[in-house]
Amino acid sequence: MIALVPCVFWKADIRLRELLTPGRTWIRRALFAGVVVLPALSLAGLWDTYSSFALYSGNPLNGSVVLTPAAWERLDTPTKSLAENISGAAYRLHLKIGRTLR
């Protein structure tokens, strides 16, 4: 996000219409994608909210579940690898609802 600041304010006499339309240069197209297209995709769950200027908006749906060792034993192997042992008697499984990018 810090890299977008000089791109947005580099030329102070730019008009809003010029900023919101993709230009012919690669920097204008990248700026258009980073400021207009990608944040719009995050509303549909197709892009990460952190890089879409929504870090502190409360939109990301995250949570965690604390499991007993007996409940952890009932999980499948891939899910077990995602759980962390927070004490000798509990495991924590972090959840993120929505589509994730890999």
Image: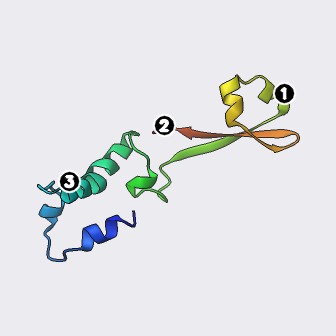
Circle 1: residue type: Ala
Kindly identify which residue carries mark 3: 29
Kindly identify which residue carries mark 1: 70
How many residues crowd mark 2 within 10 Å: few (<14), some (14–19), many (20+)?
some
The residue located at (80%, 25%) in the rendering is: 73
Circle 2: residue type: Gly
Mark closest to the chain's N terminus, 2 or 3? 3
Disc 1 secondary structure class: helix
Residue 84: give its label: none
Q: In which quarter of the image is residue 87?
A: top right
Disc 2 secondary structure class: loop
Distance, label 3 to label 1, CA atoms, is: 53 Å
Q: Where is residue 23 in the image (x, y as percent from the top left)?
A: 13, 56
Kindly identify which residue carries mark 2: 98
Distance, label 2 to label 3, CA atoms, is: 27 Å
How many residues crowd mark 1 within 10 Å: few (<14), some (14–19), many (20+)?
few
Disc 3 secondary structure class: helix
From the viewer's perspective, is 9 left or right of 70? left
Q: Is residue 3 above or below residue 54?
A: below
Circle 3: residue type: Arg
Q: Position of residue 16 (x, y in %)?
A: 16, 66
Q: Position of residue 68 (x, y in %)?
A: 82, 34
